[in-house]
Image (cartoon, rainbow, N blue to C red):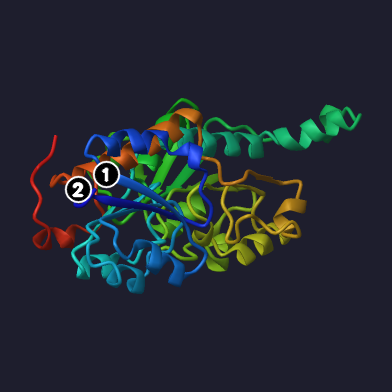
């Protein structure tokens, strides 16, 4: 039907049965949803040339792609991070970039805490020992207390704040560092804001919850790991490239830190020869901190809802590039 809004889902691989909620929301505005599996920039340009909206997990929305899509009004990313989108190019071309803060808030906070507890209590290590037939004695167990220690949170947005709420139940002292969060907001969540060096020096546990961008690429490197206590544990449930993985491996091999819980890697799927997979003091998971059945349903429905809002002439609930506002003629939505 002529004039029907065209929404293109762009990714390298798409499970067609997993877009029920998006279709339900887009059907309400009679929008067409097209699935496009794209491996290259050229394929993405071809697929999105006539799109009014693009929704994507990992599709690379480059400047060339955006500038080749003259009808494009909005890019909606299935997630909180938006490093796969050239936000400056979107702003230059009057295209909204929408993300989904909060859709997996509790899942990530729970997972971060789960990794931390697994590291400190060496749950995976002792699980493997018992299952292999060995029952260690107390004299072999070098375990430290979890309560009354100091947790350092790098990135004190909504997820960092959720982690802080959980930390209070363990009587942890909570330090935080985040240039975009005020002292008053941090205090509301029991977080004392300090500099990055002070946080690394004082914390027994460090958990990262920063978005990936130019400012946070390799935010944790060799210099930062050297500032941590040799008894400290490091957890990353944000994005792999926020951490210089080679530096983390070196920190663990040379015992600058005691261990790590890692959900995200610089290369995903992770290389089976990655040294992190061979270390007894490292707990790893497959980038699933933000996943649950309920979170997936929330995520897909919100993608459909946000896309429908913009295509109906309304502002979305959340958008990343605030500077685009003067270029976009929308009205306040519900």
Relative to 315, 124 lies left or right: right
Marks 1/2 in contact by CB < 8 Å: the verdict is yes
Relative to 255, 232 lies left or right: left
Measured as percent of width and height from the top left, residue 322 is found at 18, 57
Height in image: 135 above or below 174?
A: above
Relative to 332, 24 lies left or right: right
Q: Residue at x 31, y 51 (%)?
A: 7
Of the numbered discs 1 and 2, the one sitting upstream in the chain is 1
Measured as percent of width and height from the top left, residue 87 is found at 30, 64
Height in image: 178 above or below 71?
A: above
Height in image: 199 above or below 102?
A: below
Measured as percent of width and height from the top left, residue 209 is found at 44, 48
Q: Residue at x 50, y 27 (%)?
A: 170
Q: Is 309 or 35 nearer to us in this picture?
A: 35
Q: Which residue is mark 1?
A: 31
Measured as percent of width and height from the top left, residue 221 is found at 54, 65
Q: Which residue is mark 2?
A: 311
Q: Residue at x 62, y 32 (%)?
A: 145
């Amino acid at each position: 039907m002529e004039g029907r809004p065209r929404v293109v889902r762009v990714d390298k691989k798409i499970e067609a049965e997993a877009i029920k909620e998006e279709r339900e929301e887009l059907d309400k505005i009679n929008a067409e949803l097209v699935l496009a599996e794209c491996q290259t920039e050229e394929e993405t340009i071809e697929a999105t040339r006539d799109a009014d909206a693009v929704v994507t997990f990992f599709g690379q929305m480059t400047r060339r792609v955006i500038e080749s899509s003259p009808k494009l009004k909005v890019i909606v990313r299935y997630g909180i991070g938006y490093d796969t989108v050239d936000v400056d190019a979107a702003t230059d071309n009057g295209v909204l970039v929408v993300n989904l803060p909060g859709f997996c808030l509790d899942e990530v906070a729970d997972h971060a805490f789960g990794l931390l507890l697994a590291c400190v209590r060496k749950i995976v290590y002792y699980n493997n020992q018992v299952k292999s037939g060995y029952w260690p004695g107390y004299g072999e167990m070098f375990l430290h207390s979890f309560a009354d220690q100091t947790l350092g949170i790098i990135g004190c947005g909504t997820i960092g704040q959720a982690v802080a709420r959980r930390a209070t139940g363990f009587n942890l002292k909570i330090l935080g560092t985040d240039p975009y969060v005020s002292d008053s907001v941090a205090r509301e969540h029991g977080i004392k804001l300090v500099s990055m060096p002070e946080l690394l020096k004082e914390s027994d546990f460090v958990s990262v919850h920063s978005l990936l961008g130019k400012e946070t690429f390799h935010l944790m490197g060799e210099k930062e790991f050297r500032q941590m206590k040799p008894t400290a544990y490091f957890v990353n449930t944000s994005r792999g490239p926020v951490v210089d993985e080679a530096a983390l491996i070196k920190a663990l091999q040379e015992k600058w830190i005691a261990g790590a819980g890692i959900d995200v890697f610089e290369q995903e799927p992770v290389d089976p020869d990655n040294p992190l997979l061979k270390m007894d003091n490292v707990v790893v998971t497959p980038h699933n901190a933000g996943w649950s059945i309920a979170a997936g349903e929330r995520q897909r429905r919100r993608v459909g809802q946000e896309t429908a809002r913009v295509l109906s002439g309304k502002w979305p609930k959340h958008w990343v590039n605030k500077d685009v506002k003067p270029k976009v003629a929308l009205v306040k939505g519900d």
